[in-house]
Image (tube, rainbow, N blue to C red):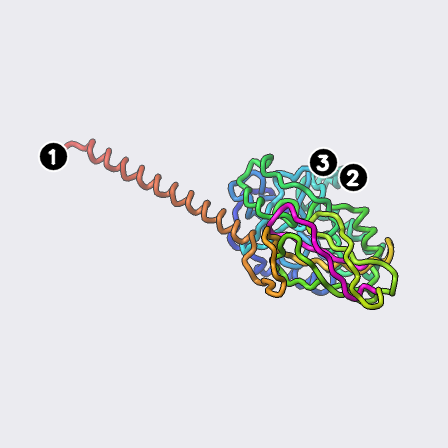
Amino acid sequence: LGEQQFEIHFDNDGSSAWSQQMDAVAASGIITFLSAGNEFGGATFAGCNTIDSPGDANLPITVASLDKDLGLAIYSSRGYTSDGRVKPDVSVIGSNIMAPDAATSDGYTSKSGTSMATPLMAGIAALMVEANPDITHEQVKAIISADSIERDLQLLDDPGFNDCSVLESRPDNEFGYGQADPLLFVQSAGAIDSSLNITMDLKTLQHVGNESSISGISSGGVSGVGFVQIKVGGGDWQQATDLSSIGDWSSWNLKLKPHIESGNSTMYSRLVISDDQMSPVDARRVILIDEKTDFSEGMSGEMTFGSYALMISFFGIFTLLGWTTYMNRNKGMKDEAIIDDSQPNL
């Protein structure tokens, strides 16, 4: 993934042997980061589909690259994957990084790429492990998902054809869940108490309407201590209402505030005893819609907005290629006709 090149993918669906091996590594409990690739997602017509293998793997954390001004690097590959999943997962500085120069014995050189951003994320994860030696890959990924700094999509500043991003809120196909926040990541890792647990009553990709009520359960809490918090996308944490009979937050509920953006998003919940003691985050991908919904008929397995956007972008690409082929063929036929007309009649 170190090379920089222009390329479009139709097979980056996580099914390659390389991607599946990386899934197996993450599933084994090893905290795994992968670079998104450097296929100029911001400068190609196919910007929405430049994530390469193994960055398209399901379980690992895929890292995009930022410039020193914190803008998304033009070379950093964008999602989606060809099966409609949103990648990358997080973004961090990877441009103009001073690194050892292999051409010398003791020199340094400036390097740029997602392969420079990924080691930085791995270093941040090492600090998270230092703060909590028992932290798991899933918990690291959930913290990154919940605590990354929200970033606006760069549609107007992106020279490439990348408008399919507009249908995503969090994560999106440019920054993922956002810009890494190393200090908050480490603080959140150190505060995890695995004896505390929380679960939202939500299905994956469930439609969540405006001002819906979210409910759930938790365990490990103490009567009269702590609270449950819910967050939608990159918004603020909101405190739920305790419905338990003994005040231990074993049952809770929250009516959501009206959301501003619709589309693919993520909801988070956590049981907080104190600033340095809280449950692992429960993160669920949902689809925010403007209408109010009945959660008794939760929807799962629906095609994501990313899938629709990817299909639209592919259709546009194929239409352009077909039109170009037609025009070239038509021009060739006209040229042949001109040549035939120019021949003398014998």
Q: Amino acid at mark 2?
A: Asp
The answer to whether one can see residue 56 in this image is no
Name which of mark 3 and mark 1 comes first in the sequence. Answer: 3
How far is the residue under mark 1 from the one under mark 2?
79 Å
Helix, strand or loop at disc 2? loop
Mark 3 against mark 1, which lies toward the viewer?
Answer: 3
Q: Is residue 262 magenta?
A: yes
Quadrant of residue 340 within the rendered picture: top left
* Numbered tag placed on residue 68 in the rendering: 3
How far is the residue under mark 2 from the one under mark 3?
25 Å
The region drawn magenta spans 248-271
Q: What residue sits 65% from the left and 50% below the top?
A: 171
Instruction: Give x and y (percent) for residue 184.
Output: 80, 48
Q: Amino acid at mark 1?
A: Leu
- Residue annotated with mark 2: 106
Instruction: Give x and y (percent) for residue 162.
Output: 55, 42
Quadrant of residue 129 within the rendered picture: bottom right
